[in-house]
Image (spheres, rainbow, N blue to C red):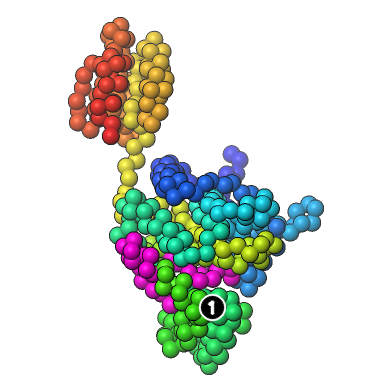
């Protein structure tokens, strides 16, 4: 027997029923984004490595340790995208889309070489939401209203917390970082290993440390809010006012800075305590300087990403959905009746495209076929035997209630219409 080739660690197979449930989450998110005027864009998963080094930051963990990068046959340095914002910014610059306000979303796979665990794979799916051309905090509030609506409709809002913060402008952070580095240098020997490294490369990321001793040291550290100028303070106050008007509950987390260099002003995370260490299910913020950094004209912008893997896990834990694969499961007692069964299936799919209709397509004992219908959690079965075909009818059986009756195609359609919300 040939050796079985297994999948790469951190690159999971997503199979039914989980794949079906993840797809349903994405459908809901796309619908909500459409209500807010966001349009779908598709971007390549490969970009020049320089795009991410310039946008995310060369001293970040993503660029320094986590990207899948390589030289192709032409010698070009390329990387699998670790996130979608940089690619979206490149696309709007390259295609001349900065003349007006633009709203986009990008759905697809991202790649980071992290230690795999539940809720964190090396290949993972996001829906990234980006808006260009609006500088007011009203846009930041709109992005958070999208998240609020999505989590409400997924029935997981009660398990999610919204954390917000302001990291101000780059010049303000320079002063804060200097003060933070000076303070933390006194306790360098007591910091965790990652924080010691970040003290020289990216001190802001120390605020994200989960190490208890480091967090204790940070309690007396300088506060970023004390370094914000009037513009940054007003932007954050405006955002809080919009959120309160929209009745979106939030908490201010002064240690929230996000791990990417391009953010400014508002940053936010939707988090949950239900998924262990991988508690961030959605995150983003404002990145006003990124378009100019990548060669475009100065353009205000903001965005965030839904983490589909974690949102799907949370959905199944808090508000699980059924594993139903079929609305109707069609059975035939012989090849002769199968022809009629296939025709009814075709006509049902044409008339009710929202319904899933499965034909058994094997000639087995009726009890065995009914067990197959139960295995796919079908709502009802349609049975075609010699008597049914002769009368141009089917035996309809509701698998939830046990109700059973003979129906013509027209009567079946009437039943579906009367019972479908």
Instruction: Tell me: 243 left or right of 124.
Output: left
* Nearer the observer, 26 or 361: 26
The answer, for residue 197, to whether it is visible in the render is no
Classify 357 as above or below 277.
above
Q: Considering the numbered disc 1 on the image, is that residue within a helix, a strand or a loop?
A: helix
Image location of residue 64, percent across then percent down: 64, 69
Check disc 1 and report the residue beneath it: 204
Image location of residue 187, percent across then percent down: 51, 91
- Which quarter of the picture shows residue 351? top left
Q: Name the residue located 64 percent from the left edge and 49 percent from the top edge.
A: 44
Image location of residue 60, percent across then percent down: 60, 71
- Which quarter of the picture shows residue 234? bottom left
The answer, for residue 285, to whether it is visible in the render is yes
Mark 1 Cα shell of 10 Å, populated few (<14), some (14-19), many (≥20): many
Instruction: Tell me: 273 left or right of 396.
Output: right
- Which quarter of the picture shows residue 291? bottom right
Classify 103 as above or below 369.
below
Image location of residue 55, percent across then percent down: 63, 65
Classify 48 as above or below 204.
above
Q: Name the residue located 52 percent from the left edge and 90 percent from the top edge.
A: 183
Check the picture and name the quadrant holding the N terminus.
top right
Q: Within the magenta stretch, is there residue 140?
A: no
Span highlighted in magenta in the image: 240-269
């Amino acid at each position: 027997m040939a050796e079985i080739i297994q999948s790469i660690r951190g690159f999971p197979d997503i199979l039914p029923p989980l794949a079906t449930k993840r797809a349903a989450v994405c459908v809901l998110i796309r619908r909500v984004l459409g209500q807010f005027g966001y349009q779908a864009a598709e971007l390549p998963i490969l970009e020049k490595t320089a795009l991410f080094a310039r946008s995310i930051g060369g001293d970040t963990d993503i660029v320094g340790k986590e990207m899948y990068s390589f030289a192709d046959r032409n010698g070009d340095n390329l990387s699998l995208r670790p996130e979608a914002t940089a690619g979206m910014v490149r696309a709007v610059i390259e295609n001349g889309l900065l003349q007006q306000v633009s709203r986009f979303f990008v759905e697809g796979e991202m790649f980071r070489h992290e230690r795999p665990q539940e809720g964190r794979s090396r290949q993972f799916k996001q829906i990234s939401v980006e808006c260009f051309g609006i500088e007011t905090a009203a846009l930041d509030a709109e992005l958070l209203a999208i998240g609020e609506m999505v989590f409400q409709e997924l029935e997981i809002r009660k398990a999610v917390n919204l954390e917000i913060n302001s990291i101000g402008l780059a010049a303000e952070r320079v002063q804060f970082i200097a003060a933070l580095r000076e303070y933390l240098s006194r306790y360098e020997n007591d910091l965790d290993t990652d924080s010691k490294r970040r003290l020289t490369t990216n001190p802001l990321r120390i605020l994200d440390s989960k190490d208890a001793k480091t967090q204790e040291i940070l309690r007396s550290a300088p506060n970023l809010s004390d370094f914000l100028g009037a513009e940054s303070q007003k932007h954050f106050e405006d955002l809080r006012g919009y959120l309160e008007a929209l009745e979106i509950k939030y908490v201010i987390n002064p240690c929230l800075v996000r791990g990417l260099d391009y953010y400014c002003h508002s940053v936010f995370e939707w988090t949950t305590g239900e998924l262990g260490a991988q508690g961030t299910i959605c995150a983003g913020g404002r990145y006003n300087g990124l378009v100019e950094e990548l060669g475009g004209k100065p353009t205000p912008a903001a965005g965030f990403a839904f983490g589909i893997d974690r949102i799907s896990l949370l959905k199944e834990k808090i508000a699980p959905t059924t594993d139903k694969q079929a609305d109707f499961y069609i059975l035939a007692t012989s090849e002769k009746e199968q022809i009629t069964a296939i025709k009814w299936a075709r006509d049902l799919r044409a008339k009710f495209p929202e319904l899933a209709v499965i034909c058994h397509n094997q000639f087995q004992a009726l009890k065995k076929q009914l067990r197959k219908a139960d295995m796919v959690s079908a709502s009802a079965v349609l049975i075609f035997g010699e008597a049914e075909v002769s009368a141009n009818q089917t035996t309809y059986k509701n698998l939830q209630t046990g109700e059973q009756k003979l129906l013509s195609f027209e009567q079946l359609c009437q039943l579906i219409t009367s019972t479908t919300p």
